[in-house]
Image (cartoon, grey):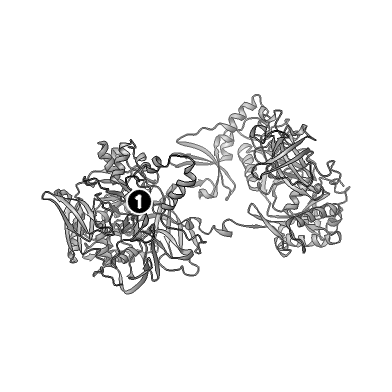
Amino acid sequence: MIINHPLLGPRDSQEFVYLGDAALMNRPDGMAEGALAAFIDFAYLRDNPAGLHRELWYHEQGDRSWLVVTRNTVTHEITTVELARDVARKAGRSK
Amino acid sequence: MTQDNRISGGQIDRSRPLRFTFDGIPYTGHAGDTLASALLANGVKLMGRSFKYHRPRGVISAGSEEPNALVELRSGARQEPNTRATVVELFDGLQARSQNAWPSLKFDALAINDRLNTFFTAGFYYKTFMWPAAFWEKVYEPIIRRAAGLGSLSKQDDPDEYDKGFLHCDLLIIGAGPAGLAAALTAGRSGARVIVADEDFRMGGRLNAETFELGGASGADWAARTVAELASMPNVRLLPRTTVIGAFDHGIYGAVERVSDHIAVPAAGKPRQILWRIYTRRAILAAGAIERPIAFENNDRPGIMLAGALRAYANRWGVAVGKRVAVFTNNDDGLRTASDLRAKGISVEVIDSRTGAEVIDSVGRLGVKSITVRDAQGTRTIAVDAVGVSGGWNPNLSISSHHRGRPVWDDAIAAFLPAPDGPAGLTSAGAAAGQMSTHAALTHGAAQAAAALSDLGFTAPAADLPPAEDAPVSIKPLWFVHSGKGRAWIDQQNDVTVKDVKLAHQENFRSVEHLKRYTTLGMATDQGKTGNVIGLAVMAELTGQSIPQTGTTIYRPPYTPVAMGVLAGRSSGKDFRPTRLTPSHKWASEQGAVFVEVGMWLRGQWFPRAGETTWRQSVDREVLQTRKSAGICDVTTLGKIDIQGTDAGAFLDRVYANTFSTLGVGKVRYGLMLREDGMVMDDGTTARMGQNEYVMTTTTANAVPVFRHLEYCRQVLWPDLDVQLISTTEAWAQYSVAGPNARKLLQKLVDQDISDAAFPYMACGEITVCGGLRARLFRISFSGELAYEIAVPTRYGDAMIRELVAAGQEFDAVVYGTEALGVMRVEKGHVAGNELNGQSTALNMGLGKMVSKKKDAIGVVLSQREGLVAEGGYRLVGVKPVDPAKPLTAGSHFVATGKPATAENDGGWLTSVVYSPHLGHSIALGYLKNGDTRRGEKLRAVNLLAGTEVDIEIVSPHFIDPEGERLRG
């Protein structure tokens, strides 16, 4: 597979480490009410789509960027690749 | 032996005779021969025995689709089983042997299986070896394993080297027949970067095997000229002897180049084979077509071949397989074989099923002697010594279905065409796309290349292609001959017959996927390249459906079998993975240290001294001397991460379960890192070197995963925290100096005052050593002794160990290895890898109070789940044997005295066991249910695997200095 890194261009997937569903960036607030239930969902429940899937990849043998890769799980076609930091900021994550 | 069957013509070099042996008998062939063509030239038709029935078998094809002629090559460590004689390029001195026959190829004892064939039909194993169940492992399986299987392995290390390489191109062309060459010419002249890969050692495909002309030249000459022109283009790379084995994601193709298989031994420094990973923008599958037989009774006798192969042996290799030949065909292409052979003076009888004639049986134990023909006049027997069979040609579409694309049926050629939804960027050309005439292949190849190039922005000049034959496909499908009760083979490699398909149908295994698995049709190493469609056709007839309704099986990579060695490449033996050496490695080697692999690192395990004959003597000495005076240990392998930024403290508070923002500058704290599910991920110490600067250490094993995790937290979870990370594991050489004399020893080297007042327990700081070299000092202890870790830039690591050892001489200081390190940490009750097993919480480890609930840190919420904090959970305990003479065994389970050692009485297990030279007996750490309340209790430690059982007492996990007076000393 080839991942088109937003900063470095097309790179072989061998350079990357896969983590999983990009929903893992939506970490709940551990101090909020109902945190336990929210964390159980966060840690254990994943969608398993046949089709487009947003997932986290880490360019370990490269520039150490975490990326959000949108990949079709049926065809392996990769439609978008973004810096996870940009995606997280857009989703309202900050400090 | 003379080459009795050699006739004139062909693309062999008669001036270069090559000697070879088959089953020990010497023969000669010529340069340009394959093993198969040379054997046929010498009149050898019998080349092997079949898998199940041990039927005598000969070659049926002239290419990589060959199901029968599997032979063992070479001898000694280079012995290689299951190579297809049809693709083995002959070289001088080649040794080949037949397989699956004992005592000899001509008389094979297991041919009795053929007589017992009524028992050995499809599903035989499922039905026969069902009971008694206990017989399976002891009786049935060993017998089956001995009887089955083809070649044998050398069981020696492979002496050859294999390489991996990366290639990039605009257009990859798979196959160098007429379509591939026309595509390559078009693409080469456009200036695009082109790679042409062909599995044959001579490019040209069928052009080398046919007699028709291209623009007045022979096909072979036109191919040779075209290949020469391509070779002269700097933008074209030709890869002969290279099989494209698979289409992978995003235009990546795998290919195996057989660099040295055509010579006896690879040239010095050359690999035997190379696995190429080819990155393409577009690819064209021009792999031609594969002929299929027609099934009739006893159609598997040596000498009965594909008609196109018979013709190829005559035209390309100058070999007349037989002198009295019959051609059995359902299409015009079979007639070509007849006319080509007749032109060479061979007598040929044609049985054309389109006229109602059929071959219904054959005779000849070790080679065909006659066939029985049934036609309008009745039944007659014809004496023959070779038969060419043509049931039509299948486009060679394997690679187009590697991404699950389903081939589509084309009635016009009675065959499947490549899937339209094959791998993105791949198109098919020529016979692989059903364009069967030479003219069609040439023009289609050029057109497909021009289309691909246009997509890529190249302008392809119109190709100047030679005029060539353009005969239409004329076929009337006939898949198998309906005749008597005998067996008609479909899949010769796995011995699947028409009867087996009928049986599968009768037992309701009618779906293609069931048919395949029940009969093993197409599951041999040839993937059913010649037989699959016939099997489908038989099933279609039985179910009354069409072939496309019956379905098709999908081909998978690799296209042809691949040697394991080339997949490994250079990653074998000591090069299996990189080896990392610590800064003290050279010094340790000089001392005769025993090393142990820790991840990729080689660490000193113990340092034997003269007179020590067992590892325990060395380890006991290292431990005792460290606790008595001083010991030095290389701890460089622990992960080190520099963490800087105004939010560094806040960041650490979130990734550690305990708090770091409150840690004073110049202080170190032990940190416990959790996974989000609440289990302990890693532990280590983190030092605050400055207001906004921390240095974290991780365990050796988790250095990489922890760094990855921290980057994830920093970039993904809290993207606006002002914190930067860099791994400095390899930037600092770090040594532990432990023991009552550690301070005195270090003070000899450290330029600053490190007295207890100036540098108390858990202090850290930037210092200098040896008169000005910058260093870092941490007063931390894993052993429980007064201890420091000192770090110098890695390039001074070798000098530093020598300085430390020299400074330690007056104290009789020792250097200790990982074993002594392990003994001392168990004596002190520190958790390590065996306790940090990924299933344990801080509470399990006795560290529950470290988990701060006042802040939101990773893993804190889920670590408090009801099940994880419930009474009765595992707690870390110390264990000692009641009888000090009894050794403990790691992995033993706690069982109450008087209770049987069964799962319901399991109370936990011993995680780490060492011999404590300090205490003079075995000690252990373990996880025991409710362990924190059970001190003094007596239990049994039972190890059913090791067969040991020891009475034990539960004690504090801190065997040494529980109050911590030594490390504060």
* Residue B301 coordinates in the image, percent (x, y): 27, 56
Q: Is residue B470 visible?
A: no
B82 on left or right of B572: left
Q: Nearer the viewer, residue B70 or B167?
A: B70
B60 on left or right of B744: left
Res B44 quadrant in image: bottom left
* Residue B447 coordinates in the image, percent (x, y): 29, 52
Residue positioned most to the bottom: B15
B851 on left or right of B515: right
Asked if A49 appears above or below B111 in the picture, the reply is: above
* Residue B395 coordinates in the image, percent (x, y): 29, 50
Question: Considering the numbered disc 1 on the image, is that residue within a helix, a strand or a loop?
Answer: helix
Asked if A93 appears above or below B42 in the picture, the reply is: above
Residue positioned most to the left: B377
Residue plotted at (18% across, 53% down)? B372
What chain is tagged by disc 1? Answer: B
Q: Nearer the viewer, residue A66 or B78?
A: B78
Residue positioned most to the top: A33
Q: Nearer the viewer, residue B402 or B74?
A: B74
Q: Amino acid at mark 1?
A: Asn
Quadrant of the image containing the N terminus of chain B: bottom left
Give the residue at mark 1.
B113
Res B498 quadrant in image: top left
Q: Residues within 10 Å of mark 1 (few under 14, many from 20)?
A: some
